[in-house]
Amino acid sequence: MIEDAEIAIRFFQGHFDPHAEFVVTGTHDAYTLASAISEALPNISLLPQPDGQIIKWSEIVDRKTEIWPIEYLLPAGRTFTERLP
């Protein structure tokens, strides 16, 4: 998903404004992803959320509580699982 953000940024800069500044944020679980994007990609700032909680992937793995929602693994995964009996 971080690579998807990078692709979107490159597209925007290439087609509209090569000097555009980008800020990311999210709510709930998406705030963790936004934080990872801002750490991994240069010149991307994280817009703080008052209730935003950043969960480090290493902590999740160490606690062995990783649960990967299908929508993180497959495109349209949520739609697919909603159609299952």
Image: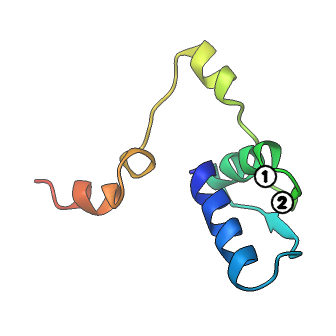
Residue 58, image x, y percentages: 67, 22
- Amino acid type assigned to the residue bearing label 2 in the image: Gln
> Which residue lies at the image location 42% right of the left edge and 44% below the top edge?
69
Say which residue appears at 28% left-offset and 63% top-offset: 79
Q: Position of residue 20 (x, y in %)?
A: 86, 76
- Res 53 visible: no
Circle count: 2
Which residue carries the number 1 mark? 52
> In this rendering, is residue 56 above or below 48?
above
Using the rendered image of the protein, determine whether residue 41 is visible from the camera's viewpoint: yes
Depth check: 51 or 38 in front?
38
Q: How is the image coloured?
A: rainbow
- Labels 1 and 2 touching (C-beta < 8 A): yes
- 69 is higher (above) or lower (below) than 46: above
Q: Nearer the viewer, residue 36 or 67?
A: 36
x, y percent for residue 25: 76, 62
Mark 1 and mark 2: Cα distance apart in space: 5 Å
How many other residues sit within 10 Å of disc 2, few (<14), some (14-19) or many (≥20)? Answer: few
Where does label 2 land, which residue? 49
